[in-house]
Amino acid sequence: MENAYFKKFGPHTSYQLDDQERSDRGLEPDKLVKTHCCFCGQQCGMQLKVRENKIIGIEPWEEFPFNRGMLCPKGVKRYLQNSHPDRLLHAYAKDPSSPEGFRAMDYDEAVKKVAQEINKIQAQHGYDAFAVLTGASLTTEKTYLMGKFARLCLKTANIDYNGRLCMVSAGAACKKAFGIDRSANAWDDITKSDVIWIAGSNVAECSPITTEYIWAAREKGAKIIVVDPRITPIARTCDLYLPVKPGRDIVLFHGVLNIMIQNNWIDQKFINEHTVGFEDLKEHVSQWTLDKTAKETGIDEKSIMKAAELWGQASKSFMLHARGIEHHSHGVENCLGAINLVLASGRIGREGCGYGMITGQANGQGGREHGQKCDQLPGNRDIENPEHREYIAKVWGVDEKDIPRKGVDAYEIFRKVDRGEIKGLLSICFNPLVSLPDNNFIRKMLEKLDFFVAIDFFMSETAQYADIVLPGSLQEEDEGTVTQVEGRVIKINKVVDAPGDARADWKIIQDIAREVGRNHGLKFEGPREIFEELRVASKGGISDYYGITWEKIEKQMGVFWPCPTEDHPGTPRLFEPGSWNPIAKGAGPFYFADGKARFHAAKYSPPKEETDKEYPIILTTGRVVSQFLSGNQTRRIGPLNDQCPEPFVEIHPKLAQHFGIQNGDMVTVESRRGKADFKAMVVKTIRPDTVFIPYHWEGRKSANQLTNSAQDPISKIPEYKACAVKIYKSTREVVQ
Amino acid sequence: MQKEVKKSLLNSIIVTLLLGLSIWLGSRNLRHFDAALVGYTFATLFAAFAITYRYTMWLQRPPTELYWQRGWQLMFTPKYFPSNVKFLIGRIITIIGGNSFIWKRSKERGLAHWLIMWGCILAAAITFPLVFGWLYFIVPDGDLTSYKIVAFGFPTLAFKIETTLGHLIFHGLVVASFLVILGVMLAFRRRMRDKDAAVLQSFSEDIMPLFLLFSISITGLFLTVSYTWLKGYGYSFLSIFHAITVIFTLISLPFGKFFHIFMRPAQFGVAIYKKIGKEKMAKCDRCEIEYASEMHVNDLIKVQKKLGYAYELNDGTGHYQRICPRCRRLLLGLSQGKLWHMKPVKD
Amino acid sequence: MSVSPEMAFFVDANRCIGCQSCVQACAECDTHKGHSMIHLETIQREDSPQTVPVVCMHCDSPTCAEVCPADAIKRTSDGVVQSAKKPRCIACNNCVLSCPFGVPKMETKFELMMKCDMCYDRTSEGKKPMCATVCPSQALTFGPKDEIIKQRQSSTPVNEFKFGNQHIKTKVFMMVPKNTKEQYIDVTASMNDSSISQNMEDHLADVSLDFLGE
């Protein structure tokens, strides 16, 4: 069965030279379509070469202002996912009697079957027994539709998305501190800064285009501070490297702030006029003396002092952070610590001064604004807020009572499956079997479901467990908008038609709604119509898209939200002095009634799973540049997969020597949840108390067999960046 | 006069005289020489002179000279001779016979070159002996259905005219023309479609030769059409036109792209050099990994010196040629990085 | 068509993040589609993530061309050293072994040397080479010379290199810090270095293994 399955669904790797069209040199394309990359949150502009409804290559798009033609390897080779041998061309039903494990079925029948199962489960167990999992790589139009579909058609409270593993800590912290969830600046401000603090971000591998912004600043004399347990490529040549012990970022921020306060390197005027809560914070951080900070963070005192000097005395500064500080059971606190440093310096809302969180997924920003989160309605409205509910009910033409209440987060959905409260699941754009922590548990839950339908373009590891798989669309087969890392709304253009029975995701969702028999408000003719409704739905909300049109996006090469009216140009830089927002209404630049930002005396607690005698080493996980997230796409693109075909474990020579491990040996890494073998990469560029494994792989190669599913109590982000493991030399031979 | 030029002129004169002599003897004191073809003969003699001149000049460039000498020396080293012969036969079949390496670049390229090459070889094999009077046909005594081939004045094979063999022999040039025309069309197609070709090709180097081959073939075919079906209509004009195209091509042989026909066999010398070189590999002075044959490295050091390069290391202990290409790239990175306030870590 | 004299290629390996975008993009160029001509080397991964991208530096008098027995390597009048001419190249490897920067690649199955030609199909039409267009760190940059020198305030471009006693001048520039004394990069001076660093690993190595409880 295994072989027949592989033959049919892969993952096979595709190369340009396999294909006559692609290997024929210099073939003139019929057209070049301007669009954006399908992978990360940088959303680089690019042009795809099309010949006879096939994508034959890429051409950089140098006019697009964010990346000016620059692309990472994923962007360069993304075109090879098109016309891929593994592409799902039919609907499939699970069929144990078939050698492939699935049999192709008629699309309409498959949709009917899905609707039947939904109705059956909901009739027996209630609406909330059917859950929806979505993703932040979908266009904003699709994410809006998914929220509406779950609430109006399925009437379930339980919809959540994979941004839960990505941006939620940063988002929650931003809301708490600034009242708005968006990077505060366009990236251009990075280049005008004097000091750039990069906390927990492997910029070079996870957001490569940001590198040039940082180097451009350095070229003008800026100092670069990198905080990371590993010397990543961006750390290699930085001015100050702080090798923090995983999970201790908040301590570092507090310690540095304490030094700044002691040396009066803070902007007291800004603090007085534009913030609240500083006195509490001051009191709170005073416990973090230099030696205590050094001891807890594992960073030497001199370096911490140096960081405080650089940051404290800068005239312009920029704070950047990513999953490194966010993927923790106290991820929100970590982010608040970073924001405290920004606010105390008063350096925000001005040229060259600001704050950015580096979104991971394509639509990491837009995907978390318009209602596919369990607690949220479009426009970043609160699902429990009566006014917000009323407004959206009006836009949707339903009674406020018909909108379900708050549901549970993506991980909790699986715990509810475990408890028998959720019986059915629809998933789109999510591969939890690879991407969720402790994924042996996830596998059991997928098996336990009464009915599981997956919408995907390739047979992902998760889709393998589905009863019905519906063939969805690749990014290039549909159009819509996406909001990238800076908060710039951009337009994805349709490049080619979906092949075979595959179709645009929004069509599939609406087909299901029709068959379920509740498709009120789910009869859109296309993404443009959805966007028009979304504009109205977001109007007056914090994430206000009302003034954005597709035409304006094209003309301006992107529009920064908030953009409340059609004649508004958009807002590249938030919190400028004297700026207006719908919450403060002129009281101040921040999104609270008094217009002031909030300091938070964020509390430090170590990772949920501390190391101990049995499991003495910290495991941290992350990405490599050529693979993306769960690898469902990149593991199928030959040249990208070849760049890093297997996971590995980075071990410091000191630690390796202790365990008699040589570079290239197979090493077993074992946690309380599982164990797996990885090839050792012995490098001096990681803390000796920490090992690192990239997480893009499935099954026995998956790092997430080991990770801990402990979550942040506020954001519900899982603690991917720190758990306790032991390592030892594997008895297995090295597999080449 | 420079030494190289002198030597080249001398070789050219010798080769031209030898060719002239062989025409004289092969045609039995010009008895079988067709006076109408004298233009072709002179163009060939000129080509022989110029090709030899250029070839000799070429062989005297330090790197070429080295391979030339090493190639023959290794070829006839008794220890290697038997395996060399076997190796060479294999290479000749795949490289010349099959153009294997060109097919790998692309099927279209492979097919185009293979067709043109075999068309040209076939045409040359038929026409040169006829022009030089080395070959002619006679009707055997009393048998009007047969022909006999006379080579260098010696009667050889006789064959029936109305047989497949007969047709093939008489229409060999037609076959050759078709091969060449097909190949040229494929090559033109590529040159028109490929962006790669579009930027790098030049008219005289790349388009002209194809154009000449096409002209020769098409005028040759017209000649056949003229005498077979049109009762010789326009035959004399066509034959002059054909002659012009052929003579022009012969004269251009030493100058343009066609010269590769004569340079190319050097590939075999190189192949033997590489094959035997593998027996003793040189290790990189920096990473101690094998990267080239010891013979090659030593020879290159000599060649570079002759060319005026000074890649000797300053301290006199070594030569940059003894560093493998990968280490050279690393050294570039290390040297640049060091300037950016970074501290080198010594081995 | 030729490469405009105002445009220049700059390499700053100090910026390189080793992402291989250049390697992937190189194979998309029409003069060598499917074959990457650029080299991206990791210097000593155990010590550091340092990487160096190496493109053809396009020497004023290219050693590769002079050692070519088949006279197959030509430098066009705009200073670009082209890949070997296909009908001539006899795959002898002289160029591969002689290039002081280690640039040409031997494609054994084609019996052909191929090398970086600055994406001649693009640069001769006024576009940038693939690698320098996509490079996310702009370790590889191509553009108007004056403009780039103005942007790179901390850097100064050099195009002279020293290998032993041999000086080589190139069309491509390499960035060195503004106040560097030498007008050239002495490549062979690093012969005994295995890697370079900024003492960062020392901080890491200081972390004790006490947590192992021994």
Image: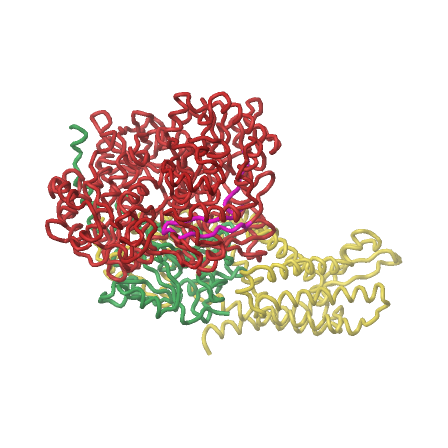
Based on the displayed image, in which of its 4 quarters is residue A63 positioned?
bottom left
Name the spot of residue A595 as percent of width and height, x first. 27, 50
Q: Which chain is green?
A: C
- Quadrant in which the C terminus of chain C is drawn: top left
Residue B181 appears in which quarter of the rendering? bottom right
Q: Which chain is yellow?
A: B
Residue placed furthest toward the bottom? B1
The structure's colour scheme is by chain
Q: Colour of chain A?
A: red
Q: Is residue A475 magenta?
A: yes
Q: Is residue B252 left or right of residue B75?
A: right
- Relative height, residue C129 to residue A680 (above, below): below
In-image side of A14 versus A363 (left or right): right
Q: Nearer the viewer, residue B286 or B263?
A: B286
**Residue A310 in the image, given as x and y percentages of width and height:** 18, 54
Q: Position of residue A326 (x, y in %)?
A: 29, 40
Magenta residue span:
A470-495
Residue C176: percent from left, percent from top: 27, 62
